[in-house]
Image (spheres, rainbow, N blue to C red):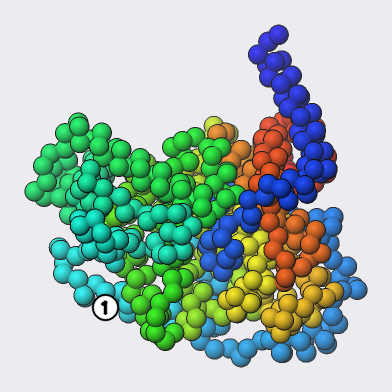
Amino acid sequence: MTPTALKRRLSLLLYYYTVLAWTLVSVCGPYCVEAFSSGSSGSGMSGTCTNIHAFGGGAVSAAVTSNHGNVNHKSSLLSSRQRKSASALYMVSTNDKTSKIKEELQGGIVMEGSGDVMDFANVKAEDSRAEVALAEARRNYLESIVVGSEEVNGDDDDDRSGTAVHRLMGINDEVVAEVGYEIGDWIYKDPNFRGEEDVQACAALIRSRYNYLLPSSSSSSSSLGGKEGMDPVTNLDKERYDMILAKAYAESGEVTAAFAKTFYLGTKLMPEEAQKAIWAIYVWCRRTDEIVDAPRPGTQEEANAAMLKDLSSWEVRLERLWEHGEVVDVLDLPLLDVRCKYPTLEIAPFADMVRGMLMDLPDLGQERYDTWEELHLYCYRVAGTVGLMSMPVFGCDTARGFNEAIAREPALSLGVAFQITNILRDVGEDAVKRQRIYLPREDMARFGVTEEQIYNQKLDENYINLMKFEIARARKYYAIAQRGVEMLAEESRLPVQSSLDCYSQILDKIEENGYDSLTKRAYVGKWEKIFTIPFSWYRTQFDLYKMFPLPGDDADKYRRASD
């Protein structure tokens, strides 16, 4: 039997296996979930980027909806007069915030292809309240440090006594509790390490390996990229610093596993180098989120001021890492390594994510979103950006003519799809615990759903129809994203497809819960995710899948980019 025939035979066998697995999931899924479920996917916050996932892709027409997500608009929508009346209850008069977000919307670019995906890279209203406040905090911060001896961190001082806790910026009590120990503390407390000295020497080694040394950096090439006065790095030192970097990567993986279970499962299907790179990116995003969300004492104004000080410091750290290869703590080392290994990785999506976090700030951010376009900007900043961060790591199938520019639309689309899913899953939780509603006012008015109803967690036909409408929108973006899977390097297709498949199932769970996302939380159990992987693999076998699609799959949703 020829290798080609053998491969075809094995593919067919796996196809029949997936059909069997499909049956098992359908019959036994509910029992597996009850007995073995690992709980919800992600940390449960839709407002910020707490469920961060990597890039997948696809494209389909704007009219895509699922069979059980369609809405009968004639019967479910209010009349035009009723909609205008309801809208008046929710639409606020134009003020500084609404005018500034409209200004930012004008800076977005409609991506070619579907016409439904907006690219808001580097878009910001410089004179918005949030931007002005952040710029002022940045100026104050830069003025407070001494050039040449600054510590651009906000971390606790290095304490070698072995008693005090060395708390890294963006690692708060919630993170420590979720992971189970003090993140990054080992390099400062373990007598086998030298704390800050080891961190900086390891960074110097990374820079030297990639010739990453800019004239404006504080480093010195005479010491192999380290700070002036440091001893040359020996081979024994290199092994030691490689071990430190490996440990920092492993710790990043533990943080990812603790906060993003579905995402982490997808990364385990990736090659080791790419897997670690995605962990490093996730941890930076996680820390940014925690800087914004960390509880702070005092009034709201005082809390915002303290947060802006930390966030401006964090942004300066990011810029110096990108421009000069500078690091502050041990968890910066993996990100520096990733930045060097993947030279096409841009700083823009990281900076844009910071803007997304600002949109959640009380008194400074965007309390409500009037239209889908406004919410789209938010989804880009807190989730679409992650797709852009991930693209250089996943790589594209350049042999078939795909590159990052072509894959940009599906990358953004999947981030948007993930964030819409978060928002729909957490409507009740966001309203009760955070006094936040992310659903566009325009959509709520269209279906006759009030804010009071959401805060009171009242499920009715109007809310059900609103959920059907929003779920159809989310599936449209998943479909746009789907076509990008084929654009990826071969080794990246399965992890992205599995993440896409697993996360989109949350929408199915909302439907199974009778569209009640007010009092019930939709989640996909551990065993359901595991059973999904064979299907995801089969969908990446494009030629075979085209001939023998899986039962129940929507042909439009799984169209290939080359079709």
Whole-percent x, y for residue 12 in the image: 76, 24
Whole-percent x, y for residue 8 in the image: 72, 20
Q: What residue type is labelled 1?
A: Asn
Q: Is residue 470 above or below residue 201?
A: below
Q: Is residue 491 above or below residue 353?
A: above
Residue 1 appears left or right of 189: right
What residue do we see at 40% from left, 47% from top?
251
Q: Is residue 131 above or below residue 267?
A: below
- Say what secondary structure mark 1 lies in: helix
Residue 50 appears left or right of 148: right
What residue do we see at 16% from left, 33% from top?
234
Displayed quadrant of residue 73 = bottom right
Q: Nearer the viewer, residue 159 or 533?
A: 159
- The residue carrying mark 1 is 140
Displayed quadrant of residue 461 = bottom right
- Let me know if residue 352 appears in the view: no
- Quarter in which the N terminus is drawn: top right
- Quarter in which the C terminus is drawn: top right
Residue 459 appears left or right of 419: right
What residue do we see at 63% from left, 77% from top?
432
What residue do we see at 66% from left, 52% from top?
503
Q: Nearer the viewer, residue 329 or 103?
A: 329
- Let me know if residue 7 appears in the view: yes
Q: Nearer the viewer, residue 199 or 121?
A: 199
Q: How crowded is mark 1: few (under 14 residues within 10 Å), some or many (20 or more)?
A: few
Whole-percent x, y for residue 287 in the image: 42, 61
